[in-house]
Image (cartoon, coloured by chain):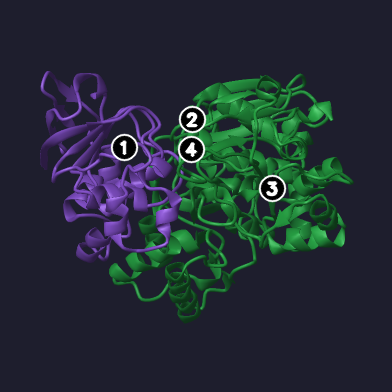
Chain colours: A purple, B green
Amino acid sequence: MLIRGNVWKYGDNINTDLIIPGKYLRTTDVSVFAEHAMEGIDKDFSPLTGDVIVAGKNFGCGSSREQAALALKHAKIGCVVARSFARIFFRNAINVGLPIVEADALDFVDKGDEIEVDLSAGLVITRTRVVQGSKLPKFLLEILADGGLVEYRKRHPRSAGPETADLQRV
Amino acid sequence: MVSSALDAQRTISEKILSNASGKPARANDFVLARVHAAMAHDGTSVLGVRAFEAMGASSVWDPDRIAIVFDHIAPASTEMAATLQKSIRSWTKRQGIANFFDVGEGICHQVVVEHGLALPGTLVVGADSHSCTYGALGAFATGVGATDIAEVFATGTLWFKVPETLKIVLSGKLRAHVSAKDVILKIVGTIGADGASYKALEVYGTTTADLSMEGRLTVSNMAIEVGAKAGIIPPDRKTFEYIERIQPQLSYTPCYADEDASYADELHVAVGELGPQIACPHEVDNVKAVEDVAGTPIDQVFVGSCTNGRLEDFKEVAAIVRGETVAVRTIVVPASKHVLLTCMRTGILETLIEAGATVCSPGCGPCLGAHNGVLGRGEACLSTSNRNFKGRMGADGLVYLASPATAAATALQGEIVDPRRI
């Protein structure tokens, strides 16, 4: 899976209240989440399809609100690249089909730069450098390829979870 | 149970996840585990139920092991929120969910504990990041998102990466007006907001043993604020007596780490000299000594939340404000109906209201900035809750996190006050 777009650059500890403030949780309308995505930190956030957020450590820390991952996905973000992710956000992103890569690319990008992410290889290609991030395990890539856990479940109704053999490869 | 030979040298997380998955699990293994109980609230159940139905699931795996609690925006503040709650209410009825707690019952984490749904040695998941609270009872409890909880509702199982464990040892006797909140704030300030990312905490030491169960719940509650997956306190006699008191005759098997269990790291914190701590805007790990920011003007004080909304907390506040009048608006939200009733019966509520506090119905209150005390532009709030992120309690508000004692002292002066000075 290849993602191409431009960079939106942020620092460490981008928390879920910055990504989508709690007052917008009173709805199930994903367009509301998308409209207010990153409102807490960047009023000018207006990504085009495939744009990539590049951030520091602990991206998505705070609340378990899945609306944070949904907000970015429906704001057309193609991938989030961060030094590290908070674990609940990590799971939520996979589950809603928002590609993520753990990679240390922050120092090699500026806002607006063109960027390419090879999700299966865990590669982040910036204007100046190719950064090797962590590769996602196969079963998580499959969930992402299907567009999230709900779609994955529809296609694989019988498997209750990742196969053990696959897990051993992680 | 996995045989004891295989249990050698295991942490509590490794043991609980081994038992729940039926195979010996080590840190960094992935397992498919069966959960003991699962929880969602009004903020997460809407997306959870939607995902559950979209997956094609028709009935939940076990209606007796699921708790749905309305606490985040409860009673509903908008027509939209009320309509969403209406849909969840009827879903719980259709599914026969035994543990449905409607408006006014309390905060999900307090309700789960009071109703004995999280027990020593069990694996519990909740669609809320502060589900790690139940670690105070010796459970492996962790927060997940809405789609994960849908998976659990449908199958009773979920995949987990077995976390490495950070062992924390607390020693020393806490001084007057210094409490569990100050201890956990000190830890957050020391190791930082991602200091235990992906890891579980196991909290030991004489201080931990001395803490009340309520204090332990405060410590485990904030494990997520260092990025931890779980914040486990090994159960002891106090734990067992507490469970017996709230829900008699429940059966469970406590789980302990082996003495030679392997830890990712150890952190020793001496708290005997510790003074009151405060997390300043806008990061939970921006922790300072209260005396260093004393005098900072405050517009609102909030006492409540899943961190500090229990009886002991209100008792402490009442002792400080008794016979006095608060200088700023002070919002008090008991964590559950049970806490509210006990505060009523013991006269604590009367003391707080006479001192000028406003009492709201049990629930999350203003913690997440949805209702019951949202901040105006540029206003500052001293809160006993757990997050002070920019925008959390209002777009342009400042949130300071501290203990109930610091909150009470601050309420009386309208500026941040070290509770040891009153």
User: Which of B318/B202 is in front?
Assistant: B318
User: Residue tagged by mark 2?
Assistant: B193
- Name the mark nearer the viewer: 4 or 2: 4
Gap in angstroms between the C-alphas marked 3 and 2: 30 Å
Query: What kind of element bears circle 1?
Result: loop
User: Residue tagged by mark 4?
Assistant: B389
Q: Chain of mark 1?
A: A
Query: What kind of element bears circle 4?
Result: loop
Q: State the image quarter where residue B60 is shown.
A: bottom left
User: Residue tagged by mark 3?
Assistant: B329
Q: Amino acid at mark 4?
A: Phe
The image position of residue A117, as x and y in percent, is 14, 34
Say if labels 3 and 2 share a chain.
yes
- Of the residues under marks 4 and 2, which one precedes in the sequence? 2
Rendered view: B364 above or below B46: above
Query: What kind of element bears circle 2?
Result: loop
User: Residue tagged by mark 1?
Assistant: A42
- Name the mark nearer the viewer: 1 or 2: 1
Mark 1 surroundings: few (<14), some (14-19) or many (≥20) residues within 10 A: some
Mark 4 surroundings: few (<14), some (14-19) or many (≥20) residues within 10 A: many
Residue at position x 18%, y 43% in the image: A78
User: Which of B29/B306 is in front?
Assistant: B306
Q: Amino acid at mark 3?
A: Arg
Mark 3 surroundings: few (<14), some (14-19) or many (≥20) residues within 10 A: some
Rendered view: A83 above or below A94: above
Residue at position x 12%, y 31% in the image: A115
What number of labels is visible? 4
